[in-house]
């Protein structure tokens, strides 16, 4: 091998450099640099489109985040209004129940008072009936005793009265 008077390492370095220059020359002649530039341009375009897509997705995500945040706030407001309405309904129902309970108590008190008055009047009627029965029985007993002692005299007097009225 031709070493041009250099040691083997330097000669090999020179031949490797010459081969590299020839290879680069052939690559440039064959247009490899245009292919590499085209590949780099395509890669740049792909990266730019990915960046644009990422930006579009970021904006879409931001829009969706704002939309869902407004929906969340609307839902929170609606939940608060539902709770307030339920609270008002509970107070109204409590007031209605209190009024209804008071009316029920008044009706039951009236019914009990009516039953007491009815029982009182029934007791008075029963006492009157019983006292009338006792009076009738007392009169019967008294008349029976009087009839036993004065019965003949009363019969004679009744016959005389009838005889006098017929004449």
Image (tube, grey):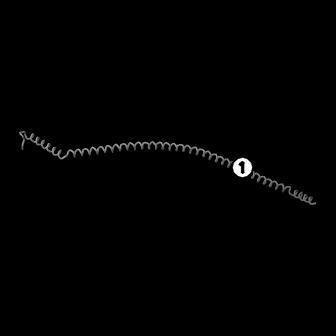
For image coordinates 15% across by 44% down, the residue present is 25
Q: Residue at x 30, y 43 (%)?
A: 48
Residue 132 falls left or right of residue 98: right
Q: How many marks?
A: 1
Q: Is residue 22 left or right of residue 154?
A: left
Label 1 belongs to which residue?
121
Residue at left 82%, top 55%? Answer: 143
Q: Circle 1 sits in a helix, a strand or a loop, which is it?
A: helix
Relative to 36, 139 lies left or right: right
Front-lying residue, 143 or 39: 39
Assign the C terminus to one quadrant of the image.
bottom right
Left or right? Give the position of 40 relative to 19.
Answer: right
Q: How far across and how far down the image is residue 78, in percent?
A: 48, 44
Q: Position of residue 116 (x, y in %)?
A: 68, 48
In the displayed structure, 30 sits above or below 140; it is above
- Dividing the picture into quadrants, the one containing residue 11 is top left
Between 99 and 10, the one nearer to me in the picture:
10
Residue at the extreme right of the image, as rendered: 167
Q: Nearer the viewer, residue 26 or 90?
A: 26
Q: Give the quadrant of the N terminus.
A: top left
x then y, percent, for residue 49: 31, 45
Q: Is residue 46 above or below residue 136?
A: above
Which of the 4 image quadrants contains residue 55?
Answer: top left
73 over 150 or under it: above or below? above
**Along the viewing direction, whichever of 27 and 17 lies nearer the viewer:** 27
Disc 1 crowd rating (10 Å Cα; few below 14, some 14-19, many 20+) is few
């Amino acid at each position: 091998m031709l070493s041009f008077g250099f040691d083997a390492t330097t000669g090999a370095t020179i031949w490797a450099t010459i081969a590299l220059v020839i290879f680069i020359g052939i690559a440039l002649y064959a247009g490899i640099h245009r292919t590499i530039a085209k590949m780099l341009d395509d890669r740049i375009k792909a990266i730019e489109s990915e960046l644009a897509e990422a930006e579009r997705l970021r904006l879409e995500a931001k829009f969706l985040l704002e939309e869902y945040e407004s929906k969340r706030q609307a839902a929170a407001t609606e939940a608060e209004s539902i709770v307030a309405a339920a609270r008002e309904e509970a107070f109204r129902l409590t007031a209605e129940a209190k009024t209804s309970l008071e009316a029920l108590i008044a009706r039951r008190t009236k019914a009990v008072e009516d039953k007491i008055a009815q029982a009182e009047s029934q007791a008075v009627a029963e006492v009157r009936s019983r006292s009338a029965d006792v009076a009738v029985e007392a009169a019967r007993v008294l008349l029976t005793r009087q009839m036993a002692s004065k019965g003949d005299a009363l019969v004679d007097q009744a016959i005389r009265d009838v005889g006098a009225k017929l004449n």
